[in-house]
Amino acid sequence: MSSAQENAALLLEAKDLSIAYGKKDTVAGVSLSLAPGEVLSLVGESGSGKTSVIRAILGCLGGGGRIKGGSVLFDGQELSTLSEAEGRQLRGRDISMIFQDTGAMLNPVRTIGSQFVEYILLHTHSIKTKEGARERAITLLSRMNLPDPAGILSSYTFELSGGMRQRVGIAMALAFHPKLLLADEPTAALDVTTQAQIVAELLRIVRESKTAMILVTHNIGVAACVSDKILVLSGGEPVEYGAAAEILRAPKAAYTKKLLAAVPVLGGERYV
Amino acid sequence: MSEEKGVILAVRDLVKEFPMADGRRLRAVDHVSFEARKGETLAIVGESGCGKSTLVKTIMNLHGPTSGEILFHGEDTTKLTGEGLRQHYRTMQMVFQDPAAAFDPKMHVEDILAEPLENFGLLKAGEKRKTVEALLRQVELPRDFADRYPHNMSGGQRQRVAIARALALRPEIIVCDEATSALDVSVQDSIVRLLVRLQKETGVTYLFICHDLALVSLFAHRVVVMYLGCVMELLDGAELSAARHPYTKALLASVFPVDAAGAIPKTIPGDIPSPLDRPAGCPFQSRCDCAEKRCQEQRPELREVSSGHFVACHFA
């Protein structure tokens, strides 16, 4: 395949992306690319700029953050040239995001159903009535293996367990078959058994609907199990980028080696 | 009797219930018994809501038990009051998950580390700085950290200060409640190595609360696995692969391998039931593959299946 053809097939391409908060540069020189349906993990320690990168792609850097340089091409469009209205069209439909705790994303004094229905009506013209949107929400929740979807729609976020809330968040993010899903530490707040359930379900749905995903995680094990590609970040700079299998088998950068060596493994060498 | 095999802490048939507004009682710890020996790391493992934090708070005497005994060197600490209790706190110290929340943000590290000693009148005049610097050296921090504020440090450095504060009174037991779970893996690794080194030097006993079995498999001498307030299994940290309880096996299976060929772990479905709605019989029956009629009727007792290995399962 020639490089022109390869580029045409790419869903997302970031080149030399740098991000600054105020006068402080936090991310520099990040380049990455993603084909439709591919899964890329951003790994690194806290403060390495993982979240800033995906927030920049979504165009919602908080706290005075801005893209300082570089380009982000999504589906052939340069994201920085989009108007506010065009950006809104893209976000939530073609690009959507899930967060560490869906309970914090949703309004605690409104039912999940009212927010889910509102979200569906805002983003699509094909469903016009509340009843229609409700039905759609129920279908989406059942796809996430949630028991009693109607009951969940009439619940408040605090009435659900962390795992159930996270399934709701994923169902909402995948409501319109986005081309790109950005997942920011989606399992970091969950118990280990729930984490394994959610990762399996997330990956199943992403594969089924051929959605590309960028997963931000500090759990190297999770990244290893789901990724096609891995980008290792440290202090806002890319350390290593490539096929997941390659990086895990033979890491080149000293930092990656150190990171991989620090992951506790069952049956590893004991310290006592 | 309880001094046998160097046992310094014995928990006997401990129950802790909390009254609810509607008159029901939430049983967070349900007839838990175990012993901790001098110089060992006893890991207490389980998912959120399994009662591990309530258990250690009861052991720390931060609240009284509903019933049961906590014997420290053979003496029931739940009966202590007043000055006796205050002096007892010297022997047990705690390290919390979020060291940023554990310190007064307006205190210098020097004052943070000296405070426990001053509380017990253990600091000689003019020796504050020297003592603080010695404590910092123990946790591998430079001397000038004494002049810093908590917000001027990274998470790992703060956790080192928290460990230094816990060490200040030379306690016999340090309780670490998820002490490394907020840290990055490489920092977590260095903190665990530090804890192991300090244990070898001082002979302190750790009660290490954690939900990561892979982590505790690296340094725990013994592991207590809890579910819904009950002890499910108690075994050697080096023998985790020989676990026989279905819940322990599920926890082990939930660990993601760091391996590109690694399949996503197959784990148990569902969530932990509400402690207000406890099933009769085995607490784990609703998520267990091998549950039978007997599991619904009869709660399995914790019994010894091989030397030092206890399991509460009808089938183990």
Image: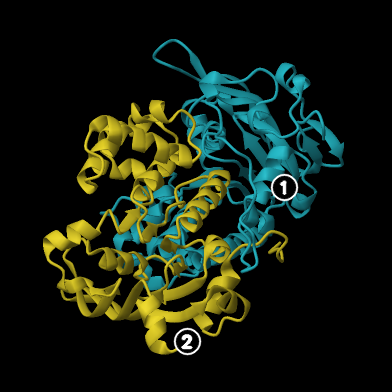
Under mark 1, the amino acid is Arg
Which label number is shown at residue B305? none
Q: Chain of mark 2?
A: A
Q: Chain of mark 1?
A: B
Q: Quadrant of the C terminus of chain A?
A: bottom right
- Residue A146 percent coordinates (x, y): 48, 35
Could you say which is closer to the camera, residue A192 or residue A10? A10
Whether residue B180 is visible: no
Instruction: Give the residue at x 76% y 32%.
Output: B290
Residue located beneath label 1 in the image: B222
Element under disc 2? loop
- Residue B133 percent coordinates (x, y): 43, 67
**On screen, A83 above or below B101?**
below
Q: Colour of chain B?
A: cyan
Q: Looking at the image, is mark 2 or mark 1 nearer the viewer?
A: 2
Q: Which quadrant of the view contains residue A110?
A: top left
Could you say which is closer to the camera, residue A133 or residue B35? A133
Whether residue A125 is visible: yes
**On screen, B276 above or below B122?**
above
Instruction: Give the residue at x 16% y 62%.
Output: A86
Residue located beneath label 2 in the image: A1
Residues at discs 2 and 1 both on one chain: no
Could you say which is closer to the camera, residue A172 or residue B192? A172
Chain letter for the yellow colouring in the rendering: A
Element under disc 1? strand
Residue ranking furthest to the front: A126
- Residue B128 percent coordinates (x, y): 39, 60
